[in-house]
Amino acid sequence: MTLGEKELTPRRIVEELDRYIVGQMDAKKAVAIAIRNRLRRMQIAAAGSATGLDASDILPKNLILIGPTGVGKTEIARRIANLIDAPFVKVEASKFTEVGYVGRDVESMVRDLVDAAVNLVRASERREVAGKAERRVEERLLDALLPGARDEDASATREKLRAMLLAGKLEDREVEVAVETRSMPGIDVFTPQGVEHMGIDFQAFFEKLAPPRARERKLTVREARKALLQEEADKLIDREKVNQEAVRRAETSGIIFLDEIDKICSAEGARTAGPDVSREGVQRDLLPIVEGSTVNTRHGVVRTDHILFIAAGAFHVSKPTDLIPELQGRFPIRVELGSLGRADFLRILREPRNALTKQYAALLAADGVAVSFTDDALEEMARIAEDVNQRTQNIGARRLHTILEKLLEDPLFDAPDYLAGALTVDGAFVQRKLAKIVEDEDLSRYIL
């Protein structure tokens, strides 16, 4: 769900995050405040000079989330973006390289953000014109079902077909419809950094050179409706308006999640060769983007001043102070996320709306198997997750994915051919299925 501006209070945001993410209250509060401050800035801008303050001078306070893998850093950022329907991209800082080296340039994350914003706006516009597009599709389907029959004599027949079409009685009937196709393949890359840094929309350019052509295809009514609905909706949408709104959203409400930021800084005093050579260069290339600069995209020019950047990293070897001072100053809020223990795993299995136990129950229910988990089963899985994380690499809540998959491997394989009805997973079931794995010293053979 998304929240409106009036509902977008920090407490309400945290309450919504609690439905999906267990614990990590400090991180949730910090992100909620950052989002609310963004709304406060917009309210100041709307008030104009009455406040005596220029809202453009109020810059977002970017965050660094510090904690081991699997504790909820990415999930917090992704959920907050979904909650407010904001453009969101997740990028790995380690994928960027210093200018002059082969690899992605740092501006690509802004272009990705605008692409995400375009998709959001286009989806919203399609919903706005859905009714009109459906009516157009209905007429085109009737034309295909009753070709050349729009005179008065055929009107009664057409209305009968319309009633049958609306009642879903013609879904499997085959019709011949003209569906738009493009004759030229897309061209993605001309230079190591791609073509988007030139600010040219090559897709639109080639569409003008080779406009879409209609090709007759035989489809069922069900298939034709799906193909024609998107086509008609796109005809009703103003592309220029979509691009302008997408750029505005990216600039005012975009969120860029910079993962693995610890991988581009070295521990104090460390002197290494190889990939470390360009780490400081990557930081310096990131700096103007985070500080606020102008980036050319195929959808328009984007200013990054008010994009919210959320960085994250484990910082096992290095620490945030190993980043260059200028970049540190652009991430003033630092929040540490705690490691997950048995009690946390138990809550993760029980509480979230998308808990793994609920996901697997739904998957098996699709094949007619009703799975239920007893309390002692959940406690045993939590205990095993904690034990394995302590004895091997600590991957946080991701350990539960591997445990559930191994635990339910046989039911998932046997359903629906050899398994149906009710299946109760209790503590004994968990111990029987996972005992060999837990006892084995070489746990990497089973859980990676």
Image (tube, rainbow, N blue to C red):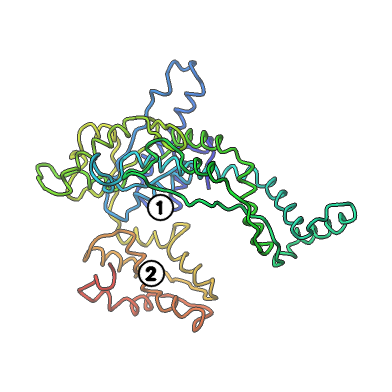
Q: Which residue is mark 2?
A: 404
In terms of sequence position, does the residue under pointer 2 or pointer 1 come before the other?
1
Q: Is residue 160 left or right of residue 435?
A: right
- Return the x and y of residue 64 as percentages of the image width and height: 29, 41
Residue that protrudes farthest toward the right in the picture: 153
Q: In this orientation, which residue lies closer to the viewer: 419 or 121?
A: 121
Residue type at numbered disc 2: Leu
Quarter holding the C terminus is bottom left
Residue type at numbered disc 1: Ile
Residue 404 vertical placement versus 436 (above, below): above
How packed mark 2 is, by other alpha carbons closer than 10 Å (few <14, some 14-19, many 20 or more), is some
Q: Which residue is mark 1?
A: 21
- Return the x and y of residue 260 as percentages of the image width and height: 27, 48
Secondary element under disc 2, as helix, strand or loop, is helix
- Return the x and y of residue 347 as percentages of the image width and height: 39, 59
Residue 356 vertical placement versus 87 (above, below): below
Residue depth check, mark 2 versus mark 1: number of the one nearer the observer: 2
Q: Residue at image x 57%, y 45%?
A: 211
The quadrant in which residue 323 appears is top left
Q: Is residue 130 left or right of residue 443?
A: right
Secondary element under disc 1, as helix, strand or loop, is loop
Q: Residue at image x 28%, y 59%?
A: 395
How packed mark 1 is, by other alpha carbons closer than 10 Å (few <14, some 14-19, many 20 or more), is many
Q: Is residue 172 left or right of residue 286?
A: right
Q: In this orientation, which residue lies closer to the viewer: 341 or 162?
A: 162
Residue 307 vertical placement versus 211 (above, below): above
Residue that protrudes farthest toward the bottom in the picture: 418
